[in-house]
Amino acid sequence: MPKDPRERSVVLVVDDDDGVREALHLVLDADFEVIVTTHGRAALGAIRAQRVDLVLLDILMPDVDGLEILQEIKALAPDLPVIMMTAVKTVRTTVAAMKLGATDYLTKPFQEEELLAAIRGAIGQRPARPAATVEREPSPREGPSARTHRLLLVGGDPGWRATLAVTLTRAVSVEMTGTFVDGLNAMLRFRPTCVVLNVGRSPGEAGRFLGALNAQLPACPVLVVSEDPYLGAEPVWENLNIRGVLRPPVSSGDLVSRIGAVLSPGSSMTGPWPQLGESVTRAIDHLGRHFDEDLTVDAIAEVIEISPSHLAHVFRAETGLSVRDYLTRLRVTIVQDLLASTDEKLESVAARVGFGDTSHLAHVFQRITGRPPSAYRRGYSAV
């Protein structure tokens, strides 16, 4: 006997293919309340207007691609599970979807049992909904769909990238990549609204990256971290949308402040912009350099010369996290980076990042990201 509609989970199907929508109705109607839209903008409106427990989202759609809609769904409802659907599964799209928060990824045509298992599993893992949730209606000034800022971090070491990513993840969508080649791929897929580029010792590659960025996204502002304030005086730099060249070492607090000044404040942020004082800046910079060590609040407080209780108070006030939670998320973010960009064994990654063993790493990784490290890495290597 079909369930009472009031008891059934609501599945939102977003696909422009009439045949796919009809097939999904046939498979899902007995167990779920199914609503359908043919494009991403309508899906965002449906999520604002009514209860939705899971989204089945096609990647290739005519108006806006599914990855961009996925970003906006996660900004609007971070805990809402989204299963991506596509007829052509590639490493890049799988990587992008998982990085942006997709719960699962199915290739068409999919088996009925596989689809139902994925939906039930995703809904079952979702945190319990509050008794009543009212989504804020967008103001006329925002338009029908407020977009969140997308920050792309390119270059630098894993600790540098992860420090910025963890610090800013409440306010903007962040993606990071260690090489300029990967940065080009990320730029085309992620469509950043701001780029922070750490040139390091490769000004030529950095110049080519910025030339490509300017060709694809000429309005995208760039902050450059470089030893050479004149950037080698290469002609490619002259007409680019560079908003500042910062000479290393640059503190996290200064860089966060500069990024905030470049981005337009207001409704495009998904949370408050961090305002980091000197003590918290020094603590974050220390964590970014020594994340692999056995760090304690007392030890960090001694390094930056304040009391442990004061550090704990101001750190939570300015970052929204305890020192311990921040360090955990920093380590997990670095692990994600290494799993995506290297073939390093999990045992080696655990030791390199500061986890006692692979079991501890796997437990913490799944708690933070919602999936085990092996599944996360498969998303980057499976074809």
Image (cartoon, rainbow, N blue to C red):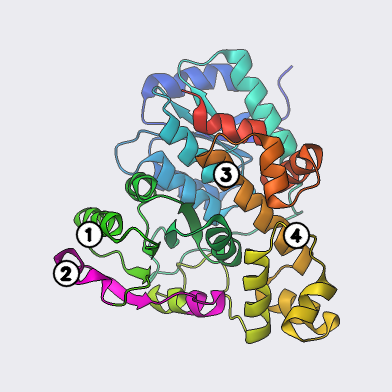
Q: Which residues are magenta?
A: 230-257
Q: Position of residue 198 (x, y in %)?
A: 41, 63
**Above or below: residue 176 compared with residue 249:** above
Asked whether, in this view, residue 293 is left or right of residue 72, the answer is right
Q: Which of the 4 image quarters holds residue 374?
A: top right
Using the numbered discs, state the Cα–Cα distance from disc 3 to disc 2 in whole angstroms.
Answer: 34 Å
Amino acid type at image mark 4: Glu
Query: Which residue is the site of mark 2?
Result: 239
Amino acid type at mark 2: Asn
Q: Secondary structure at mark 1?
A: helix
Numbered label attached to residue 214: 1
| Mark 2 or mark 1, earlier in chain | 1
Q: Nearer the viewer, residue 8 or 245?
A: 245
Q: Residue at x 34, y 35 (%)?
A: 61
Res. 338 mark: 3
Label 2 and label 4: CA atoms lie apart by: 43 Å
To which quarter of the image does residue 21 belong? top left
Indicate whether residue 233 is drawn in magenta.
Answer: yes
